[in-house]
Image: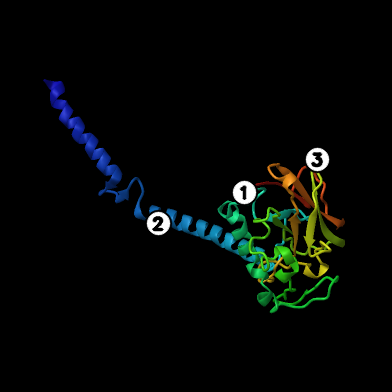
Amino acid sequence: MSNKDEKPEEQKESQSTWKDFVYNPRTGEFIGRTASSWALIFLFYLVFYGFLAGMFSLTMWVMLQTLDDHTPRYRDRVSNPGLVIRPKSLDIMFNRSDPLNYRQYVQHLQSFLQKYNDTVQEKNELCAVGEYYDQEGEEVKKVCQFKGSLLRQCSGVDDANFGYAEGKPCVLVKMNRIIGLKPRGDPQINCTVKGDRALQMDYFPNDRRFDKMYFPYYGKKAHENYVQPVVAVKLLLTKEDYNTELTVECKVEGCDLRNNDERDKFLGRVTFRVKVTE
């Protein structure tokens, strides 16, 4: 009986101890500390984190003073550009007798060439051929004209289907943009078919060059309306070439840009496959 009588007393004592820990009215302590002790702790952490925030803000401000609005200070991208094609597909395969089958390629080319419209490009500068267009010190950089009509049969003006309806598709080749790039020599595009098969091709412009006047590029912010030079390649497939998958490789040649790095197969070159059926 005595043990049973003691249990309620122990429970009351336990509850009283817990309540005193949360708040002790005799000492004025809250969770084991007085109000002044808690105030000192909060003040310490307030000063500590305020100091860290101030140091971080100062560091960020100093770093921002060293940045250029137009050119990244540190660039880990390669100094040599890669090649890409339009339409944006490395497998160009279609039935020339079915417009729906190649419509995606045609629409992509039409969309890409909108900014190369002659009317739009006439607002840009008529630059000197064969000379770099240096614009150091100018806040807003001017843009050299590249009219879509230079692509002739691949411009979409005379042939809205870019040769896909006749089984002789056009492919546009361009270099990736690299800020400050000035290729030495005359960069030009040369395309070949891998294997023993030969294939005739037409290039537009005829010289296949990326003229120096389109270099250097000063970045998206400064060169807002910049358009890259492109070379159009018209693949002159014959009936003997139909129903056969052809692998075409295009390289940039005639300059100091690299095109034979086995670790990066898109550095200065691009490879794509073409297959036309009737």
Q: Secondary structure at mark 2?
A: helix
- Horizontally, residue 51 falls left or right of residue 11, namely right
Q: Quadrant of residue 205?
A: bottom right
Residue 147, image x and y in percent? 72, 71
| Kind of residue at disc 2 | Ala
Residue 61, image x and y in percent? 62, 66
Q: Which mark is residue 95?
A: 1
Closer to the observer: label 2 or label 3? 3
Q: Which mark is residue 120?
A: none
Query: Pointer 2: what residue?
Result: 39
Asked whether 206 or 115 is in front, the reply is: 206
Q: Is residue 172 above or below residue 218?
A: above
Q: Is residue 216 above or below residue 6?
A: below
| Kind of residue at disc 3 | Gly
Location of the N terminus (image quadrant)? top left
Q: How is the image coloured?
A: rainbow
Specify few, some or many for label 3: CA neighbours under 10 Å numbering under 14, 14-19, or 20 or more. few
Give the mark, 3 or 1, whose residue is nearer the N terminus: 1
Asked whether 86 or 125 is in front, the reply is: 86
Query: Pointer 3: what residue?
Result: 195
Give the residue displayed 50% in from the left and 59% down from the top: 47
